[in-house]
Image (tube, grey):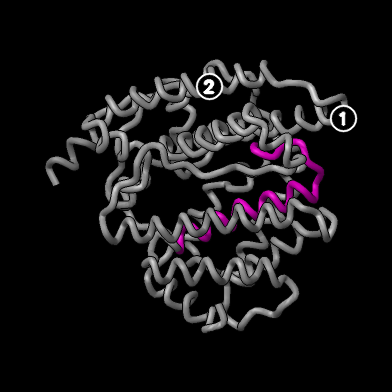
Amino acid sequence: MAIQSTLEKTQYKLPDLFASWPWQRLLSPHFEQVEVESRTWVESFKIFGEKEQISFNKCDFNLLACLTYPLGNKDYARVACDLMNFYFVYDEYTDLCSREEAEKMAATVIDAMRNPDTERLNGDIIGEITKQWWKRGLALTKADAPCIEHFIVGFDEYIQAVAQEADDRATLRMRKVSTTSNFVEELPAPILEHPIVADITDIAAQLIGITNDMHSYRLEQARGLDGHNIISAIMFEHKLELQAALDWLGAFVEDLVKRFLANVSDLPSWGKDVDERLKVYVDGLGYWVRGNDCWCYETKRYYGDDGDDVRKTRYITLRAPEKGYLTQGQLKEAITGMGDSA
């Protein structure tokens, strides 16, 4: 306890990851409307207790959606909000899961996405919430659009990685720094597979994951979930203390940003139509990276009411131990509600 108390009083300085990032903060003009709609939708499932729901709402995942997807129409913004809320509801459940439970949840999610017109079992909260946001997403595109299968495959990779994380927690396994997930958007395959475009995509995925890990470290450390965080991986792999690990991360991200911007400058031309679509794609990545970083300061999730001060001074202290928004009892209810069909 004495060591923990000392850590909570020690200040650490965050690196300014995106001082040279050219994409600036941009918020969807539909934010106020879709925020109410999506928040009401999540609350209708009664996933959390009253106090925990208030805390969940303060995280403002709808703001994250509208900062990272600022250019779409109102329906697009609504689906983005539903998706972000789903991500973090799923995260709260799987933080408590064993590998087996996380795999069952993953199977339920993919089943709901591949069979969106199938009625879910009574009590299958995860299946129903997946089905509802996915059907709204499907309405935005053609039934045979390649992006549908691309999204399902990418989403399956994500939730399988979450299941692996549950196993890592159970076995106290530490991840390597190089472990990243793919970020996939719809473009013709030959364009996406071009080495420069592929590198741009991979760097954006790394920057998004790194940003989230840096800002969420205090929360995850307080909940005992930091073993899968890149900060912990850097400390473990390079035998560094926390401040030195943050400094290492800052230098690493500086190199990634330089490489991203150099790649954008070196993009070849594929003709006016493809070039315009590619610009939209790259801008989408740019706004995602910037919006994600902005949200981390503006949400109450990571810094409470101190987000603006942290953004200005970059100094943080660690948090006292705390629990998540769900209990093991609520997890068991959700698992039971899925039945054996998943």
- Residue at point 23% right, 29% down? 240
Asked where in the image residue 330 lies, by quadrant, the reply is bottom left
Q: Residues within 10 Å of mark 2 (few under 14, many from 20)?
A: many
Q: Is residue 276 left or right of residue 63?
A: right
- Considering every residue shown, the one lying at the far right of the view is 272
x and y, in percent, of residue 47 in the image: 53, 68
Question: Residue 181 shows which numbered tag?
Answer: none
Is residue 226 in sight in this rendering?
Answer: no
Which quadrant of the structure image shows residue 319?
A: top left
Q: Which residue is mark 1?
A: 273
Give the residues drawn in magenta, as a range: 67-93
Instruction: Say which of 246 and 294 sits in front.
Output: 246
The answer to whether residue 87 shows anywhere in this view is yes
Residue wearing tag 2: 257
Q: Which quadrant would the C terminus be assigned to in this image? A: bottom right
Q: Is residue 44 above or below residue 28?
A: below
Q: What crowding class fits label 1: few (fewer than 14 Cα within 10 Å), some (14-19), or many (20 or more)?
A: few
x and y percentages locating residue 28 in the rendered image? 73, 37
- Image-quadrant location for residue 274: top right
Question: In terms of secondary structure, where does tag 1 sit?
Answer: helix
Dominant SS type (magenta): helix
Q: Secondary structure at mark 2?
A: helix
| Viewer-side label of 2, 1 | 1
Q: Disc 2 marks which amino acid?
A: Val
Residue shown at 75% from the left, 57% from the top: 137
**Which residue type does callout 1 highlight?**
Asp
- Tell me which residue sits at (64%, 38%) in the image: 68
